Image: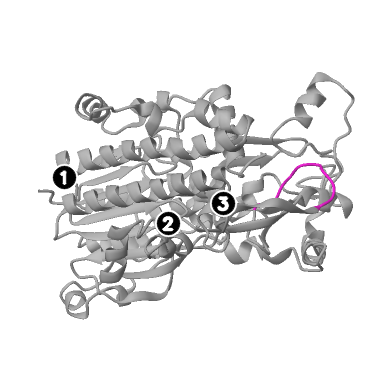
Amino acid sequence: MSKTSTLFIGLDGCTFTVLDHLTSEQPGVGVVMPFMKRLMEEGTRAKLRSTPNPLTPPAWTTMQTGRGPGVHGVFDFIRSEDKGGEVYWTLYDSRDIDAETIWQIASRQGKKVACLNFPLSAPPPEHINGCSVPGFIPAKHMRRNTHPRELFERMKQDIPGFDPKELAWDFESEKQALEALDEDSTENWVRYHLPREEQWYRVADYVLRNEQPDLLAVMFDGVDKIQHQAWEFLDPALIPENPTPWEQRMRDVCVEYFRKLDGFIESLVETAGPEARVFFCSDHGFTAQFEQLRINTYLGDLGYLTWAESDGSEQALRREASDFANLDWDKTLAYCRTPSSNGVHIRVAEKEGDPGIQPEEYDAFRDKLIEDLKALRNEDGEPVIVDVLKREDWFPGPYMKYAADLTLVLRDHGFVSIRHREPAVIKRERPAGTHHPDGILMAYGQGIAARGMSPRRQIADVPCMLLHSLGLPVPEDLEGKVPKPFYDREWLASHPIIIGAPTAAAAGQRDIEEMDDNEKQQIIEQLQMLGYME
């Protein structure tokens, strides 16, 4: 029997829109997730507000650190720098997290931890008492970035059918879907995540039984990937009433995925044992995106940016086909770097002769830009951009200057496009799945009250709950709180919330074999398919 006191299951992109639907009786299929239904009835849950831009890397990093992006330093999949004449980029990894994670906080206080499939967990952080198997990296890098290294060899030997290519992002399978998102390839791409999720379940089960950590945390990311491609078959408001054969197959494979996921969760909870507390959260929720905003096209129409003119050279053609905006940097004052950022960067001249506005013009320029952004309307006269977030208000901390000057909140919560195409706003032919700021938070087990739905919480609350569950003090500099309504009053009285010393400085990182340009481009292609890049 496991001695694990705390089991944490991350469900990337999970939302109560889908979860409530799949835990209720459905015609022809019954209750798809009966175990989750029981946990929801016997525990407490709440909507969970994500980071200001509800995106996987910053949100999961806040969940792991209890700090906002302005403090931990992660804002996107891609870290970019404006050097005046060019914009340079690289992929974020764990070395960019400038805050102590809960895995490190618990480890230095004698707790054994296991973190499985979380983004930005490669290279593995130093000073982890337990194990880490990274997610969101190429298969060839998994052995090197598993901690301890010998755990990878043991799993390969002991877990039937262990396949690192299925644990990692499978470039070839996903590239095929990217190249031709016809009906068959879309169905196959969704179906691909069934065995992949089973691989992560087997790893979690193996670690739970053999390592017996005090805290086991595993993240299942197929929820997010399937919803991006198949949202209209999961959202009760969009499910076709008279489906075509292909639409029925898509609905069936989505149901199959969530039914199997429910079984994996049930097995892990049973293995953790009746003494364990079980927590669930997602990094963000999901909703439908009905239109597309080509933000750089709009900024170009208003004169804030100038597109680069092609001279027909090979270099110019490569730039036009690249994944980033192809701009005339000498004439561009404001632009968006990546769709996933939903952010507008203002170019400020650092010295005489640099392109951009003068520093003293910044406030007036930004105010006018905000006014112009909020003025945009779709063909029905509705505002496309419903809020514009200033970075000092939403990303305070030492890394605030790396945030976009302005973060856009769209009417349908969609991601923007940065392509040079007209018109600036178009309706989508079919609704697409996109991120919503409200994800899920659930708790069940010893000490957890059966209170049903509780008021909304913040994603920075999650690490506070996990540390408290381990019997550890919550560092005073974490931005979240332990939500008292989740707990039985008598249990909480005997297990009081203790606020402790602040977190330690971020631990040093190990050397890592860098991904080559081809591997980085493959990751970009995956992000393209999910709508984060173009």
Magenta stretch, main secondary structure class: loop
The tag on residue 212 is: 1
Q: Amino acid at mark 1?
A: Gln
Please report whichever mark, 2 or 3, sits nearer to the chain's N-terminal start: 3
Q: Residues within 10 Å of mark 3 (few under 14, many from 20)?
A: few
- Residue 217 colored magenta? no
Residue at 72% of width from left, 31% of height from top? 322
Estimate the x, y position of residue 445 in percent, counting from the top left: 21, 65
Crowd band around label 2 with a 10 angstrom C-alpha radius: few (<14), some (14–19), many (20+): many
Query: Disc 2 on helix, strand or loop?
Result: loop
For discs 2 and 3, the disc positioned in front in the rendered view: 3
Distance between the Cα atoms at labels 2 and 3?
30 Å
Identify the residue at image location x=59%, y=28%. Answer: 521
Callout 1 crowding tier (Cα within 10 Å): few <14, some 14–19, many ≥20? many
Identify residue for label 3: 243
* Three-letter residue code for mark 2: Ser
Q: Are marks 2 and 3 in contact (CB under 8 Å)?
A: no
Instruction: State whether residue 504 appears in this view.
Output: no
Q: In x, y percent, where is residue 446?
A: 18, 67
Mark with earlier residue (2, 1):
1
- Magenta span includes 422: yes
Q: Residue at x 67, y 39 (%)?
A: 534
Q: Nearer the viewer, residue 316 or 446?
A: 446
Dot 1: element: loop
Query: Magenta segment, which residues?
Result: 415-424
Q: Is residue 470 visible?
A: yes
* In the displayed structure image, the side of residue 226 where residue 110 appears, left or right: left
**Which dot marks residue 25?**
none
Q: Taking 408 as reference, is 486 left or right?
A: left
**Disc on res. 282:** 2
